[in-house]
Image (tube, grey):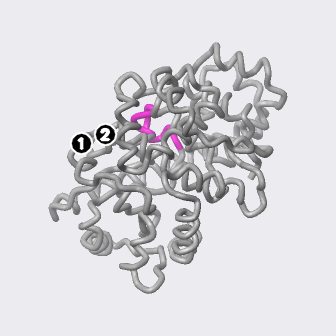
Amino acid sequence: MPAATAEDIRLLVRLTRRDVAGVERCLRTRSASLDVLAETATAHGLSVVLLRALEGSPLRAALSSSHVEALEGRRRRQETRSQILLEALTGLAERFAAAGQPFVLLKGLYLAARFYGDVRGREFIDLDLLVPRADRARAFGLLAAAGYRRRSRSLFGAGLTCFFVHGFDFATGNANVDLHWCLSRHPSLHLDEQAMWARRSSYPVGGRSYAVLCDEHEVVFAALSLLRDLERGRPKIKDVVDLIQIVAATDAEIDWEALLESGRSEGTFGPLVNVLGLCLEVADAHDLAPRLRATLERHADRRVAPPQAKSPLQFRPTRFGLGNKLWSARVHDTTPAAWLFWWATSLPFRVAVHRWRRP
């Protein structure tokens, strides 16, 4: 997979935002061709986003025919997948409703519909559902009754494994479901689950309204998801583009200072300040969320400066992702020793859960 450069990320963000002046500014300093951008987008799951951003733009003519064909192929594949997952979601929603089981729709279909304008406007491969932690076993049973088989393995039993991870993967036919029972799993995190469920909102997807996270928790979830991938040394630039889309769309409504202040008790203060700050810097997107930028500037003393390598999301030393792990240890609201203890203890369980090969 080609490493994404800061040039790639910044141009992708401006194209996605349809910011003509921003695109022109990026192109004036860009050294690589747009074919290179297309290869990066294809490798990082942004083919559909790039293709839609280039519709009606003269820049599309700068792509070679082979790259356009590759992007179009990815779009056709995503259209088919989106329809399959939308039908799967409808079936699961009816089954969960009949059983009185609440759930929140995360990521994929919701992100595409709200922040990219179309359920087919962003690449994703599965459904992500969140259920209350106490309903985890019940939700497992409902998925099994619907024909879904758990693909995530467990170590020393599902109960113990669930203590160390935030979700399991299930599959049936062509549809995959990632069932979550918390936004992220780490001993430094103390998210108020009751408040999260009380504040949930709703959004129409495919002609039906689904429960979704409130905007504040959507930001928290996206930031914690990206932090996990940064820690592993395998960050996705798609998640960076997603996070910029989310904060740009919600900047005027969210009380950022209040969100960070609540993070002091919930263990999300350090992660939010650092992940959001990193994304705005890497994407050169401070102008897209000016209220967030001003808030982050007031907490600059909590930022952990990463020693960047060739890619803006890869930190030195790069061997075994050590630089990313050291950075993440300091970003969490805990001591590096406590972080290391949790990382080492939870590693066998996380490996067991994610050992299966995703299609």
- The reply to whether the C-beta atoms of the residues labelled 2 and 1 are less than 8 Å apart is yes
Label 2 sits on residue: 214
Task: Please name whichever residue, 172 or 313, is drawn nearer the observer in this view of the structure.
Answer: 313
Task: State the image coordinates of residue 140 (x, y, percent, origin top left).
Answer: 31, 72
Asked which quadrant contains residue 263, the reply is: top left
Q: Residue at x 55, y 24 (%)?
A: 17
Asked which quadrant contains residue 73, the reply is: top right
Amino acid at dot 2: Cys
Task: State the image coordinates of residue 15 (x, y, percent, origin top left).
Answer: 62, 26
Image check: 34 left or right of 145?
A: right
Q: Secondary structure at mark 2?
A: loop
The residues colored magenta run 112-122
The answer to whether any part of residue 24 appears in the image is yes
Task: Please name whichever residue, 70 or 97, is drawn nearer the observer in this view of the structure.
Answer: 97
Vertical relation: 6 (above or below) 90: above
Q: Residue at x 50, y 56 (%)?
A: 334
Image check: 240 left or right of 116?
A: right
Vertical relation: 116 (above or below) 58: below
